[in-house]
Amino acid sequence: MQTDYKLISRIMAKKNIGADLEIRGWLRTKRESKGISFLNINDGSSLAGIQVVADSARLENYQSLVPVLTTGCSLRVRGELVKSPAKGQEVELLAAEIEIYGPAPAESYPLQKKRHSFEFLRGIAHLRPRTNTLGAMTRIRSNLARTIHDFFHRHNFYQIHTPIITTSDCEGAGEMFNVTSLDLARLAEQDDQLDFRRDFFGCPASLTVSGQLEAEAYALALGRVYTFGPTFRAENSHTSRHLAEFWMLEPEMAFFDLADDMNLAENLLKFLITEVLEQSREDFNFFSRFVDKSLPARLQAVRENNFVRISYSEAVDLLRKSGRNFQYPVKWGTDLQAEHERFLAEDYCQGPVIVFDYPKAIKPFYMRLNDDGRTVAAMDVLLPGIGEIIGGSQREERFAPLLARMEESQLDIKNYDWYLDLRRYGTVPHAGFGLGFERLVQFVTGLANIRDVIPFPRVPGNAVG
């Protein structure tokens, strides 16, 4: 691989006037004036590109080159970095050589110098990362992913890779994508019965909705672990909050209770927000300026303030006494809806809030039963503008209560016998949570639709690109 060219982000940071440099990237805009062309070239390493000055007096191929330079074409440019006389930029590259790697015919290239709607860009998911918005989002997303690993490394966690294919429905909602190697077309033609004994795994299998159960096994051996990867949910939802394929961060900690769980979640979010504010400043400022002007205040509130903590019962009372006409009625025993979560975070607490001790009937089987017999040691972290971003709990470490909850949930116990073994042999109190990574990216960018914070969104009716 050739490495003699420089990233534009590094050039703009150092501004080494007089240096002979080579860059490679894509043409954003071209402006011509009296035998000189001004080319804005971006290589994806930063929001801003660099202005290249192509002078007919210096370039032998100027007359044949400039007419075919169109938005989107890829170029190699070598030249001298000089001070720029123009306003709004300190330096520019005075071209000595320009080579076209690949053209982008103007009559068919869909990205031009104008604003495109997010809906339009979702239809060309393979080209939309070349836009300012998607490029900035991707750099922030990458920085957040790296920071997640930094945080857990500093806190003595071990990363594990949990299976993508599973036989367990962790959430118990039944919204799972089946995995099979059977010839379904042949079975349909023959009107045959599905015999999973003939399938690849010899039993029904699905794509995972969570790596939590497997992570628990390793937490009960290594103490602190986390898994970070794609999860899948066959929920037929077309809202701006849901994806069929999304990324989850799931730490699991032995010897942690619910209070420890909440503390870790709060510290993690503050660490991640601080990193964005300090290390992704250029891209963050872009979103603050063009997408959501309230972003700086919202993120500062997360970083600087203690999270408010209220029980589910207290939250229900607050919602009922709020005087708000909610679309979904509020009563004890029902799950909080997005409108309820946002009221608590945006109006009542005016900042991040953690709701804990939910009714057991609306939570999965693995959450620890409280002494009152009707609530579990669960918690949700709610953020302004986004609602729930983290859901977690202290896990049920006692064999008998766990088995009873599994039977109440009508689970096939033999499929979870390995999970019960974790309670038979050396069980300890432990806890964990799941953070929806795309919702985190939404929160720090202000982007309203979750489909715009993942490279290739998978939603009902669309798996292209």
Image: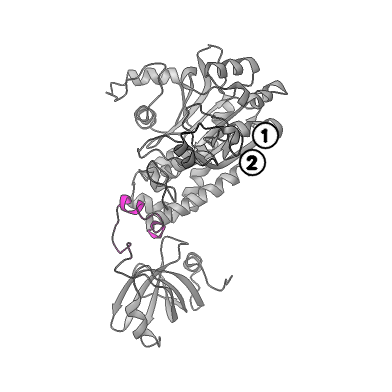
Q: Is residue 434 above or below residue 30?
A: above
Report x, y in % for residue 83.
42, 75
Locate the N terminus and report the quarter of the image it occupies.
bottom right
Q: Which residue is mark 1?
A: 218
Amino acid type of the residue tagged 2 in the rendering:
Ile
Amino acid type of the residue tagged 1 in the rendering:
Tyr
Report x, y in % for residue 413.
60, 21
Disc on the earlier residue, 2 or 1: 2
Bounds of the magenta segment:
109-131
Foreground: 84 or 38? Answer: 38
Q: Decide if residue 266 is on the left or right side of residue 30.
A: right
Q: Is residue 313 above or below residue 415?
A: above
Q: Which residue is mark 2?
A: 160
Q: Decide if residue 376 is on the left or right side of residue 103.
A: right
Kindly state the secondary structure of the residue where label 2 is placed. loop
Given contact means CB atoms under 8 Å apart, are the residues at marks 2 and 1 in contact? yes
Residue at 45% in and 39% down: 189
Q: Main secondary structure of the magenta part?
A: loop
